[in-house]
Image (cartoon, rainbow, N blue to C red):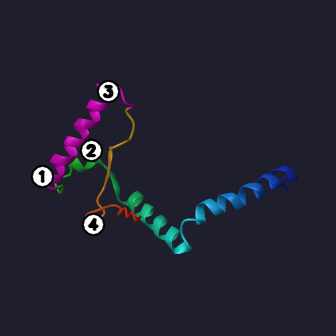
Amino acid sequence: MPDTFSIDILRRLAVPLLALLLGGCSTLDYYAHLGQGQWQLLQAREPVERLLQDPQTTPELARRLALSQQARDFASASLRLPDNRSYRLYADLKRPFVVWNVFAT
């Protein structure tokens, strides 16, 4: 059984957190849409190395992926940026853009 301190903290944080999360959008459909898009990205990603070795990869895509890996290697070796998984995965979503940003003033 949770102690009263934990319950009190949860109650104090729940309302401001919900207000922050839900304040910008009027429906939960928006958040469902965001979750679906993120899920598509996570499911579509593949290691760039595997795509470079795959004969099915188009020459143009292979050229662009190889160039991205050269830039990534340069960033780690010459600029001393962390050599992690950043830019080592690729996701083809079969559409021209991953996101659209709309600004209104």
Image coordinates of residue 54 in percent, x first then y, are 20, 51
Residue at 59% from the left image edge and 65% from the top image edge:
23
Image coordinates of residue 6 in percent, x first then y, are 81, 51
Q: Nearer the viewer, residue 37 or 54?
A: 37
In whole angstroms, how far apart are the C-alphas of marks 4 and 2? 22 Å
Q: Which residue lies under the disc numbered 1?
A: 59
Q: Which residue lies under the disc numbered 2?
A: 49
Q: Which residue lies under the disc numbered 3?
A: 79
Q: Given contact means CB atoms under 8 Å apart, are the residues at marks 3 and 2 in contact?
A: no
Residue at 18% from the left image edge and 53% from the top image edge:
61
Q: In the image, which is nearer the foreground, mark 4 or mark 1?
A: 4
Q: Is residue 18 left or right of residue 10?
A: left
The answer to which quarter of the image holds residue 80 is: top left
Q: Given contact means CB atoms under 8 Å apart, are the residues at marks 4 and 1 in contact?
A: no
Q: Nearer the viewer, residue 92 or 29?
A: 29
Amino acid type, mark 2: Glu
The answer to which quarter of the image holds residue 76 is: top left
- Per the image, is 68 magenta? yes
In whole angstroms, how far apart are the C-alphas of marks 3 and 4? 33 Å
Instruction: Tell me if residue 2 comes above or below residue 94 in the rendering.
Output: above
Amino acid type, mark 1: Pro
Residue at 27% from the left image edge and 66% from the top image edge:
95
How many residues crowd around disc 2 within 10 Å: few (fewer than 14), some, or many (20 or more)?
Answer: some
Image coordinates of residue 3 in percent, x first then y, are 86, 51
In whole angstroms, how far apart are the C-alphas of marks 4 and 1? 19 Å
- The secondary element bearing badge 4 is classed as loop
Image coordinates of residue 51 in percent, x first then y, are 24, 50
Instruction: Tell me if residue 81 comes above or below residue 35 in the rendering.
Output: above
Q: What segment is highlighted magenta in the picture?
A: 58-82
First in residue order: circle 4 vs circle 2 = 2
First in residue order: circle 2 vs circle 1 = 2
